[in-house]
Amino acid sequence: MGEFSKGLEGVIAAETEMSFIDGQKGVLEYVGIPIGELATHSTFEETVFLLWNRRLPTSSELESFKGELRKRYALPSGLARRIPEIPTTAQPMHMLRTLISEMSLYDTHPNDNDPEQARRKAMNILGQAPTIVAQFDRCRRGLPVVEPDPSLGFSANFLYMLNGEKPTDAMTRAFDICMITHADHGLNNSTFTARVVISTLSDVYSALTAAVGSLRGPLHGGANEGVMKMLNEIPSVADAEAYVLGKLERKEKIMGFGHRVYKAKDPRAKELMALAKQLADDTGNTDLYEKSHAIERVMEREVAAKGIYPNVDFYSATTYHCIGLKLDLFTPMFALSRIGGWAGHVIEQLSDNRLFRPGAKYVGPHDQPYVPIAQR
Ligand SMILES: CC(C)(COP(=O)(O)OP(=O)(O)OC[C@H]1O[C@@H](n2cnc3c(N)ncnc32)[C@H](O)[C@@H]1OP(=O)(O)O)[C@@H](O)C(=O)NCCC(=O)NCCS
């Protein structure tokens, strides 16, 4: 047995060609391309192609990839009928986890993991998950569902289905940048979960269902909702410093800060900070951005020496708010993007699989007598 590492810190548990992270320098690359380059020049569809194929597409390959995805925006009728039956009080992450699981019921070969089949399932989930989230949100608001528009790209189509009107180019681009920056991130908890599940040669739906369950946690993807709640709790920019100092004093965590791998500013936070500022100015939410920036300044002064900096969730909260998304849709947005990464990792794991089965260090007693129940 090897060394025990609580939380598996420092353990290398898989090889990947998808993303590279240098936590000390604050570098993230997808297939060798810095995240800033992709956020500036790429689209979400192209980024997913890159992750799944480990190279950028030619223009005809990209067109055919987009065409394949757009064909899958619509839900099977059984799944579409389910959505209005879901209680309007259901939380979107629980709803999404359940319906990704249910997608397998409409697949006549749900257990088939050969590369083409796994890719087809991945494409189905990537195409249908936004429709599920948007239709559920419309139903719970008592609004008629908006069917997907296959003439629109991934981000524009999602915002259209959610709001019932075509988004502006600026909003579409902002959303697409969020999708690009959240798509993959090494062996994070939910990606590891997906790889662990598929390593039993289970199926793509089971792996991604489990991954959504992992992402929901407040220490992982759920942190973006925590950030927004914190921003709402702080009455004004002038109160940010006292708020942060009080939390640190009570040894409470500030959501959107700290990372197991990054000991420098998360490069995704850098991209999203610029985006959040621009959107906040454009949508009259400057105050929200200023509060975030004030928190970052206090945290930098107080805890940067411990390697605690803003992570991806910190400025994505302001960004999603400015795009007009409701608080409980923030983590589902992370999921819609990360489906690209999870699916890529599942396909990668299947291509060179070995069952994950770590050991546990037993710390209980030995040689105990069995005491009959009447004598306990
Ligand atoms: C991401 C996270 C879970 C990483 O956890 P980890 O690697 O296990 O690190 P720990 O929780 O053990 O923290 C190490 C130290 O930094 C401190 N720390 C870590 N994140 C902190 C935060 N957000 N605010 C204040 N202090 C923090 C811890 O209190 C601890 O201090 P100590 O050594 O004095 O006890 C953690 O930073 C966190 O909970 N952040 C807030 C949630 C969040 O934003 N998650 C999204 C991640 S992308």
Image: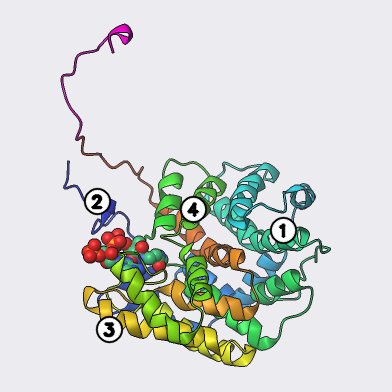
Name which residue type carries label 4: Ala
- In what element is the residue under mark 1? helix
Who is closer to the viewer here, 126 or 275?
A: 275
Q: Is residue 353 left or right of residue 80?
A: left
Mark nearest the camera among 4 and 2 is 2
Which residue in the protein does label 4 denote?
211
Q: Earlier in the sequence, mark 2 or mark 3?
A: 2
Residue 92 spot, x, y in % from top left:
63, 57
Would residue 366 be counted in the magenta stretch? yes
In space, the residues marked 4 and 2 are separated at their CA atoms by 21 Å
- In the rendered image, which residue does mark 3 sit on? 301
The amino acid sitting under disc 3 is Arg
Which image quarter is the N terminus in? Answer: top left
Find the magenta span and give its range: 363-376
Q: Secondary structure at mark 4?
A: helix
* On-image quarter of the C terminus: top left
